[in-house]
Amino acid sequence: MISEVDDNMSGSIDFGEFLKVVENQKTRMENMDHESDLIDAFVACGGQPDKSGHVKRETMIKIIKHDFGLTIDIEELINKIDTDGSGEIEFGEFSILLAK
């Protein structure tokens, strides 16, 4: 971490470089948590931890409407994000759906 921000290669960091370390770490943690949470949700809905597989359209509708009781038009959202028209939601599509 220190070598990433030690601009003058002194082997130690000044306050400005320290702030870069903190900011870099915050960014890493934000990205990791979001990605990890997204994968966990994908797996819980039927996908695989390596982002392969898919979530069935019917499963997603059941979770949103029945399990969570939400009144959003999930069918329309799925139609918009299911770019290949498979009726199955792959990880990329799942990510887009949860971002809406």
Image (spheres, helix red, strand yellow):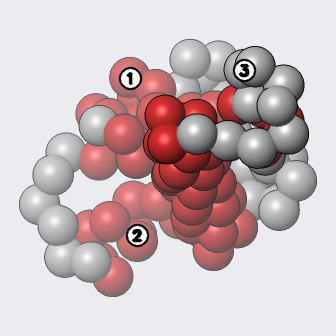
How far apart are the two marked residues, 3 and 2, measured between alpha carbons? 53 Å
Is 31 in front, or is 51?
31
Tag in front: 3 or 2: 3
* Residue tagged 1: 80
Describe the element under mark 3 as helix, strand or loop: loop
The circle on residue 62 is 2
Q: Residue at x 75, y 19 (%)?
A: 8
Q: Residue furthest front?
A: 10
- Mark 3, residue position: 7
Q: SS at mark 1?
A: helix
Seen as rendered, the residue at the extreme bottom is 67
Within-10-Å neighbours for mark 3: few <14, some 14–19, many 20+: few
Name the foreground residue: 33 vs 95.
33
Residue 46 location in percent, x, y? 70, 66
Residue type at the position of mark 3: Asp
Establish if 84 lies above or below 14: above
Crowding at mark 2 (Cα within 10 Å: few <14, some 14-19, many 20+): some
Q: CA distance from mark 1 to mark 3?
A: 47 Å
Residue beneath the point at 33% across and 82% down: 67
